[in-house]
């Protein structure tokens, strides 16, 4: 009798553990989905969209100027962090290059020096030529470039996600075009 | 007195903890371990308790929102009464905690404490080191300034290099496509809930094992650790010649912890809080981000790694380090404990210390970074201009205008990215100078497209004057021979 009773109890304990296991795995699905949401979020259209950098008159021919835009995906409490800068180079009034400020090495903000026609990075000493191609230092590639188009006398770029060495390879062109 | 006794008895009858606390406090420890070398663990715990206390105090004011965090730190620094002091205590407490955790690790490594039967204590200790460093990094992010913003950018850039998964890892780390509100919120959750929770759990296990297995005995050269005999030998050390932990050993722990707390407070008063530096506004690009002290070595390493091997080293290096640390007690679980009989252990410690120290020292000067304003803030030394021709002076102007100075120093002023040019004419001939300026190379950009022929001529003319007065500049031997010979021939017949 006693042996029977213990095995019945033991079975009930196992049943309880099993039940909780099932509940836990059911709960795990929404929890994991919630945790992964930044990476999974609407991957099809992506985070990027076409943004206006302003009229062409802000970007004189032959010069490279800093432009800023408000990131398209934004929360009310993002503050200044949603304001993103980029470098716009007007080659000849028709053709442009729009570079991310993020160094292709580790993402620090590169500065444009018109006198020597170089972009220099303050972190680890990367340098780039005016067309964004790598000049020296640790970067493995040229500056990241945004796709651009001109509509109604305004310059638009496709942006919305911080360019990083790993992602840029798929979606962004390298900085080796034009001269 | 009698009332306190009665009150104590009342609680103890219900809690039933007095006896086990007394036994724990008075448990015997080997006589030699009542030493000043055995105080770092308790001091690290004291630092952690200070961090918890000051952290809670800061959380009363701090706003973990990307739009408000920076201004709430300003309020803490300038408006809240003694807010600056609590921030300084938390910041200096963090530095002291890492330093003491490292000292503790050094001591237990050199004293062979990771050997049988304390392998798991060491492994949990390695996890504690990881979460402590995790606290330091996430804490640096919560000080949401320019360094924090671009530091996150560096973290994201490293994470993005993970094969295949990279972009998703970046989105997970940042909580979205860019560094913004969601990023700060998740680092706040990590710094305030997740990592401290892990830390408390690991500390609990770590301490429990120290009590159950006993503190590591003082290592004696020749006293070999063997699995079969260790427990009996340790029992002899504690029960025959041992002393009670309280009060024989504990007074040193208490005094040292007090001394550390006092030092943290003194640093906090004298040096004040860390930052925040400029606002976390990514459109302000006139910034030179710098990590906190304990990550400086990494900052230096990242600028020295050759581009081709950087990604594999960044991704595999940490894993190898972790595996080595975790495998250590299994590879060397028995044998000598004394550092006097473990030369490789001592040399490894020295090598690591010198390497990290050198990298940290270099990172404080960052010689690999161009000095962004050297071209406009450091004039050419006058001794390099007096008595020079107009062309050479024009060259000096080109030298400044084209920002050569950002990477090349003259008279020890300017960048150190490239070599100092005070005596460049001794090493390079005119042709070599022209080639170097136009084509670049050896980590120097090519300036051919950016210099007119006249500017190049002037610049090289100036560079050729850069040599000590008593030494003759480098010259192309073949060219000198032919030109010189011709000149002699032309001149010698005379008119």
Image (cartoon, coloured by chain):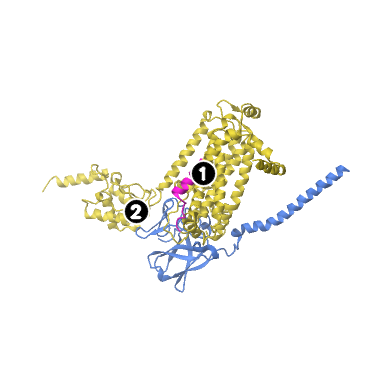
Chain colours: A blue, B yellow
**Above or below: residue B446 compared with residue A56:** above
Q: Residue at x 51, y 58 (%)?
A: A168
Q: Which residue is mark 1?
A: B261
Percent x, y for residue B482? 23, 45
Q: Is residue B274 magenta?
A: yes
Looking at the image, which residue is at 17% across and 45% down? B489
Furthest toward the bottom, the residue is A152
In the image shown, does B358 or B6 lie closer to the viewer? B6
As drawn, B345 above or below B93: above
Look at the image and tell me whether residue A41 can be seen: yes
Q: Does any portion of residue B158 appear in the rendered image?
A: no
The residue nearer to you, when weighing B284 against B315, is B284
Say which chain tag 2 marks. Answer: B
Q: CA distance from mark 2 to mark 1?
A: 42 Å
User: Which badge, 2 or 1, comes first in the chain's sequence?
Assistant: 1
User: What crowding class fits label 1: few (fewer than 14 Cα within 10 Å), some (14-19), or many (20 or more)?
Assistant: some
- Chain bearing tag 1 is B
- Front residue of A169/B86: it is B86
Find disc 2 in the rendering and name its residue: B374
Q: Residue at x 42, y 70 (%)?
A: A56
**Residue B420 magenta:** no
| Res B104 quadrant in image | top right
Which region shows up in magenta? Answer: B259-278
Which SS type dominates the magenta stretch?
A: helix
As drawn, the residue found furthest toward the right would be A1
Left or right: B326 in relation to A109: right
**Seen in the image, is A36 located left or right of residue B357?**
right
Element class at badge 2 = helix
Side of B230 relative to A83 (left or right): right
Measured from the top left, where is residue B135 in percent x and y?
55, 49
* Dot 1: element: helix
Q: Residue at x 77, y 51 (%)?
A: A16
């Amino acid at each position: 009798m006693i042996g029977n009773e213990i095995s019945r109890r033991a079975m009930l304990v196992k049943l309880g553990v099993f039940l909780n296991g099932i509940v836990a795995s059911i709960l795990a699905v929404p929890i994991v989905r919630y945790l992964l949401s930044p990476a999974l979020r609407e991957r099809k259209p992506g985070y990027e969209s076409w943004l206006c950098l302003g009229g062409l008159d802000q970007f004189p021919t032959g010069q490279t100027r800093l432009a800023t835009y408000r990131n398209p995906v934004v929360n009310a409490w993002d503050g200044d962090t949603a304001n993103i800068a980029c470098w716009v180079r007007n080659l000849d009034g028709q053709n442009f290059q729009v570079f991310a400020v993020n160094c292709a090495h580790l993402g620090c903000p590169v500065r444009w020096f018109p006198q020597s026609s170089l972009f220099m990075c303050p972190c680890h000493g990367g340098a780039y030529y005016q067309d964004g191609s790598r000049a020296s230092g640790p970067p493995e590639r040229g500056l990241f470039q945004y796709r651009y188009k001109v509509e109604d006398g305004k310059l638009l770029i496709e942006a919305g996600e911080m360019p990083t060495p790993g992602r840029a390879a798929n979606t962004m062109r390298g900085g080796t075009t034009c001269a | 007195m009698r009332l306190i006794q009665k009150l104590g008895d009342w609680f103890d009858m219900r809690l039933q903890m007095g006896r086990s606390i007394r036994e724990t406090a008075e448990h015997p420890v080997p006589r030699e371990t009542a030493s000043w070398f055995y105080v770092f663990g308790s001091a690290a715990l004291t630092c952690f308790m200070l961090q918890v206390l000051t952290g809670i105090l800061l959380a009363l004011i701090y706003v973990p929102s990307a739009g408000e965090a920076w201004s709430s730190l300003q309020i803490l620094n300038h408006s809240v009464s003694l807010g600056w002091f609590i921030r300084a205590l938390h910041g200096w407490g963090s530095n002291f905690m890492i330093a003491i955790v490292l000292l503790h690790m050094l001591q237990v490594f050199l004293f062979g404490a990771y050997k049988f039967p304390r392998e798991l204590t060491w492994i949990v200790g390695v996890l504690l080191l990881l979460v402590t460093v995790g606290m330091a990094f996430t804490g640096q992010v919560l000080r949401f300034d320019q360094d924090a913003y671009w530091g996150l950018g560096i973290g994201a850039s490293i994470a993005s290099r993970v094969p295949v998964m990279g972009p998703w890892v970046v989105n997970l780390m940042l909580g979205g496509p860019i560094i913004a509100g969601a990023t700060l919120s998740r680092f706040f959750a990590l710094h305030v809930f997740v990592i401290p929770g892990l830390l408390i759990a690991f500390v609990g296990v770590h301490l429990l094992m120290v009590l159950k297995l006993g503190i590591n005995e003082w290592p004696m050269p020749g006293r070999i650790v063997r699995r079969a005999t260790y427990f009996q030998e340790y029992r002899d050390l504690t029960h025959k010649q041992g002393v009670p932990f309280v009060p024989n050993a504990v007074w040193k722990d208490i005094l040292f912890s007090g001394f550390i707390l006092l030092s943290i407070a003194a640093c906090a008063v004298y040096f004040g809080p860390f930052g925040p530096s400029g606002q976390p506004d990514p459109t302000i690009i006139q910034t030179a981000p710098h990590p906190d002290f304990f990550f400086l070595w990494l900052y230096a390493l990242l600028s020295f790694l050759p581009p081709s091997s950087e990604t594999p080293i960044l991704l595999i290096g940490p894993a190898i380090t972790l595996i080595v640390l975790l495998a250590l007690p299994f590879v060397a679980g028995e044998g000598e404990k004394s550092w006097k009989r473990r030369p490789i252990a001592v040399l490894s410690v020295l090598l690591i210390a010198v390497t990290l120290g050198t990298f940290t020292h270099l990172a404080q000067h960052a010689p690999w970074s161009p000095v962004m304003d050297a071209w406009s803030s450091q004039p050419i030394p006058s001794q390099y201009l007096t008595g020079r021709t107009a062309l050479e002076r024009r060259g000096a102007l080109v030298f400044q205008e084209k920002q050569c100075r950002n990477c090349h120093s003259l008279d020890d002023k300017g960048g150190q990215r490239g070599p100092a040019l005070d005596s460049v004419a001794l090493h390079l001939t005119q042709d070599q100078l022209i080639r170097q300026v136009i084509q670049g190379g050896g980590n120097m950009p090519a300036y051919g497209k950016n210099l007119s022929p006249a500017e190049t001529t002037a610049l090289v003319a100036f560079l050729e004057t850069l040599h000590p007065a008593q030494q003759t500049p480098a010259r192309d031997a073949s060219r000198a021979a032919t030109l010189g010979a011709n000149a002699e021939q032309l001149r010698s017949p005379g008119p």
